[in-house]
Image (cartoon, rainbow, N blue to C red):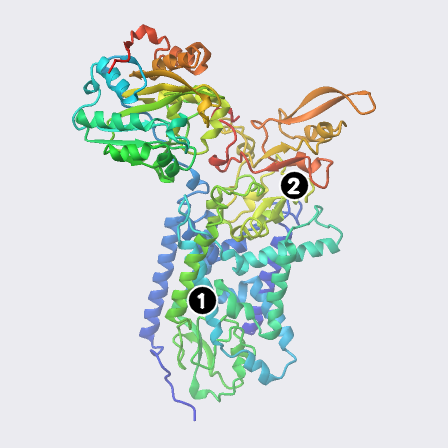
Amino acid sequence: MIPPDPGPGPVATRREFFRRGLRAGAAIAATGGLGAWLWNRHPPGDFGRTQASDPRKDFAVRAAGPRMAIATGRDRAAMLRRALAAMGGIERFIGRGDRVMLKVNAAFATPAILGATTHPDLVAELARLCRAAGAASVIVTDNPINSPESCFELTGIGAAARASGAGLFVPRQGSFRAGTLPGGRLIRDWPVLDEPFAGVTKLIGVAPVKGHQRAGASMTMKNWYGLLGGRRNQFHQDIDGIIVELAMLVKPTLVVLDGTDSMMTNGPTGGSLADLKATNTLIVATDPVAADACGATLLGKTFRDLPYLVRAGEMGLGTADFESLHPARVPAQAS
Amino acid sequence: MRITTARRIAQAFFFALFVWLCVVATVGTRLWQWRGWPIRWFLELDPLVALGTALTTRSLFPGLFWAFATIALTILLGRVFCGWVCPFGSIHHFVGWLAQRSRPLKRRIEANRYHRAQAVKYCLLAALLAAALLPVGRMMLGSLQTGLLDPIPLVNRSFNLAVLSVADLAAGNWAGAGRFYSGAGLVGAVFLALVLLNVAVPRFYCRFICPLGALLGVIGRVSPWGIGARRAKCTECGVCDLNCAGACNPMGPIRPSECLMCMNCLDDCPSVEPIAYGPRPSPAGEITSPGMSRRDFVISVAAGLAVVPLARLGGATANDWPAGMIRPPGAVAEEEFLARCVKCSECVRVCPTNVLQPAGLSWGWEALWTPALNNRIGTSGCQSNCIACGHACPTGAIRPLTLDEKLGRGGFEAAGPIRIGLAFVDRGRCLPWAMERPCIVCEETCPVSPKAIHLEEVEQTIREGATVRLQRPVVDPARCTGCGVCEHECPMSGQRAIRVTADNETRDRSHAVLLHHEKQ
């Protein structure tokens, strides 16, 4: 037997056909509308393009004027306190409610005693002094060369930050933002550390004095290299140029240059105590160019031996003739 | 004229047009060359190309709006594209008919019965679209892998790389350029295997694999017209299955999403019009479900979502980017490239020097059959005054450059020329560097002006005591565009003494070797 019509489902009536026709028309209209809306919305190459922002970081306290102090001794924390006191106290620079970033040099996963990185004693004492001056928060950061976690742990900087109540910011890939430095030739559409700067009101750079095979010396100005992301090693093709641009990029509140021991050979990595020389000096300044010009003397150089200092001085980014700032000299106290 | 005759004429026409558009994908101005032929047209008609790139890039490359014509046609009439237009479908149709025609009727009818494995193609479609939809990587784009199975890119690739190349070889390089393609064997083998499956089951690929057919099947569910049987007049003889292309059970209840609109059932039915084309639903009932269970769907989508992140774990789109993979000029950055390229090989075919090649598996399976340069295989490197590949690309994976943009002139001076890589001298293999013999072919053939290769002159006392004047090539990265002409011409034919890698390519800023202001 043949089963009678109709089969399962709705019957092909005129009403049903009309309904289906309307539905088909609506589907065609919707597809066409969607296609028109998507029409070349992102032309090829659109996704590689970035919106470069102005990456400059200006945290200078200009009202305090240019100030500089050179302390001598072996106790880093004590030298720091005395140098700051000679500059009129940290309260001139750090006030109540300030959010302070300490940009350390944590480039290598080596112990502090080898002098390739910022000494943890300085990190701890700076963080303590900032808090005592009323700072609401202190964070410590760097974009190191070696594995970031290892760097912060093995240098002792991480432990110092924790012990003094400071936060530690370890950069991730997303922490950087493409920026183009106005007037810059090198920092163009380049990833610059951005995320930890949110809410920051003061910036202190803290770096050791090191010889550097390529740049001649690595001190507070070269330390800003750690704010760069991407394949930044290509800037070694123009190391003086990039250090000068970093000086245009960053205006810190203060810099602390640690020449208690200076790395005389095999810089910037070192690796042996034999690379270090006791130079028993700690420099605090509002002007990184002046601080580094002074630090150069610990390496047996003058600012004239370091082209980036000469150029930065000529461009008015700082004072290479640091003696003209009449730095306060703070000798070691008998305790 | 019978409707099936009209269908056969349409199939023959579109197949001939397809082959013609493959043949003319050759740079030149003669009638059988590109001139102005719309060589991308079949790819642009393909809704899966349009949908896939729309999912990965949230954008529709302008030419792909043609797909709207196919979609509108399918919404109105069902899978007419499969039965009347698709060149790959026509190949299957013909080979299937050829293989089956002498077999007993009973066996032919059985071979055309609906099989529940026909739901597999919907699973493949779901997995491919899920992979396209999932944003991964820095640019948060999906990975477009539809081209592996999408019939138009597949048949395009097979004809361009395998079928026409073999024909060309047999005809004594009629096309003028050499036609050697690394991996063409695999492309041809896949094509041959899919075609030969018609011997087992007619239209095997269309029924069980084709993700485009699955997409059109889903779209065509809303069509107001379709094939339907009037069971009152039906004797249940089953002859309507004899030549049924889609295995859609025309006797009813029909599966409209499987019906390829071949119309053979109308022709074959011996009774007085029990089967007719008319308003849906069919009087004998319909099964509109694709036959894929909810579990099948979830598993397919999950597999599609998982597979791209797994592939990306290899790091080929991150720090371990393959330096040997030189993309053609105008290619967008790799993540976007993988979101756009459908592996159709149109650019590979059109490249006048044959330097552009389909990638094998050595750069990760995501890059399989995508275009990259091989400076040894062709007749030269990438030609300075050629922009053919970008204009052949249907999806914008390779941007359609102007010569001014490629060469960095006429308003593009600030950006400089498009660089696809950088040449490196291997001083251990280079004749003047390593073997005290003059050469400098690389410097002579460097097409960049001023030259990207300059010469260091040295007087050298050689083994016999004589002094020779040697000129040693040195590459200037600020001028080199990576065109590969030097590599192609280097007399060290085994492994060249000057070789290009993708370092310094324009399309990815993080691959730059030079400082920003050093760019020309």
The kind of residue tagged 1 is Tyr
Mark 1 residue crowding within 10 angstroms, few (<14) / some (14–19) / many (20+): many
Point out the residue furthest to the bottom here: A1
Q: How many numbered dots are placed on residues in this image?
A: 2
Residue at mark 1: B122
Task: Find residue B426 and report its image quarter.
Answer: top right
Local SS, label 2 = loop
In-image side of A91 versus B295 (left or right):
left
Which residue lies at the image location 44% right of the left edge and 10% below the top edge? A304
Point out the residue furthest to the front here: A335
Which residue lies at the image location 54% right of the left edge and 63% below the top edge? B85
User: Could you tell me which chain the residue with mark 2 belongs to?
Assistant: B
Q: Which-is-in-front pick, marks 1 and 2?
A: 2
Q: Earlier in the sequence, mark 1 or mark 2?
A: 1
Q: Are marks 1 and 2 in contact (CB under 8 Å)?
A: no
The kind of residue tagged 2 is Asn
Residue B469 percent location from the top left of the image: 76, 20
In-image side of A153 versus B421 (left or right):
left
Q: Which mark is residue A29?
A: none
Residue at mark 2: B375
Mark 2 residue crowding within 10 angstroms, few (<14) / some (14–19) / many (20+): many
Disc 1 and disc 2 on one polypeptide chain: yes
Nearer to me, B4 or A316: A316
Task: Find residue A14 and report its image quarter.
Answer: bottom left
Vertical comparison of B313 with B490: above or below: below
Nearer to me, A111 or B71: A111
Which residue lies at the image location 39% right of the left edge and 45% below the top edge? A41
Q: Taking the image as drawn, is residue A269 in sight? A: yes
Residue A13 percent location from the top left of the image: 34, 77
Q: Quadrant of the N terminus of chain B?
A: bottom right
Residue B199 percent location from the top left of the image: 62, 73
User: Could you tell me which chain the residue with mark 1 belongs to?
Assistant: B
